[in-house]
Image: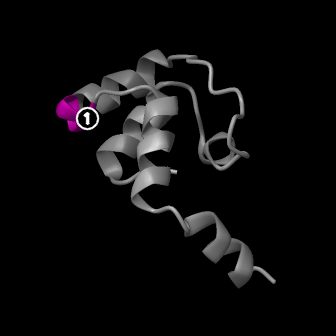
Amino acid sequence: MARDLGDFLWLLADGCGPYEAAAPYGADRTSRPDEALTAVAVRCAPDARSTAAAVVERAAEEFPGFDDMITELCR
């Protein structure tokens, strides 16, 4: 869902939680910024500013087999 803590904070700040981030590809990741979480992300990861959709996309590129690995572990 995110490559690192900075990306995760910006994922949350953009109104996307872990459940939404793990939703199937192509899911609606419309920005719904949260003021309080944005303040945390700005303070803790100012150089990682991003939208939730971009965070999920970069994570999928960096870890292409992650979904399949987790699914296999759950069986």
- 51 sits left or right of 24 in the view: left
The residue drawn where x is 43% and y is 27% is 37
Say which residue label 1 marks: 48
- Residue 23's place in the image compared with 13, above or below, is below
Coloring applied to the structure: one colour
The residue drawn where x is 63% and y is 27% is 29
Image coordinates of residue 34 in percent, x first then y, are 50, 19
Q: Secondary structure at mark 1?
A: helix
Asked if the stretch drawn in magenta spans residue 53, the answer is no
- 20 sits left or right of 1 in the view: right
The residue drawn where x is 25% and y is 26% is 42
Image coordinates of residue 46 in percent, x first then y, are 20, 29
- Residue 16's place in the image compared with 59, above or below, is above
Residue furthest to the right: 75
Image coordinates of residue 44 in percent, x first then y, are 23, 37
The image quadrant of residue 7 is top left
Image coordinates of residue 39 in percent, x first then y, are 33, 22
Q: Who is closer to the viewer here, 18 or 1?
A: 1
Q: In the rendered image, which quarter contains the C terminus?
A: bottom right
What's drawn in magenta, residue-wise? Answer: 44-48
- Residue 46's place in the image compared with 21, above or below, is above
Tell me which secondary structure the magenta stretch mostly adopts. helix
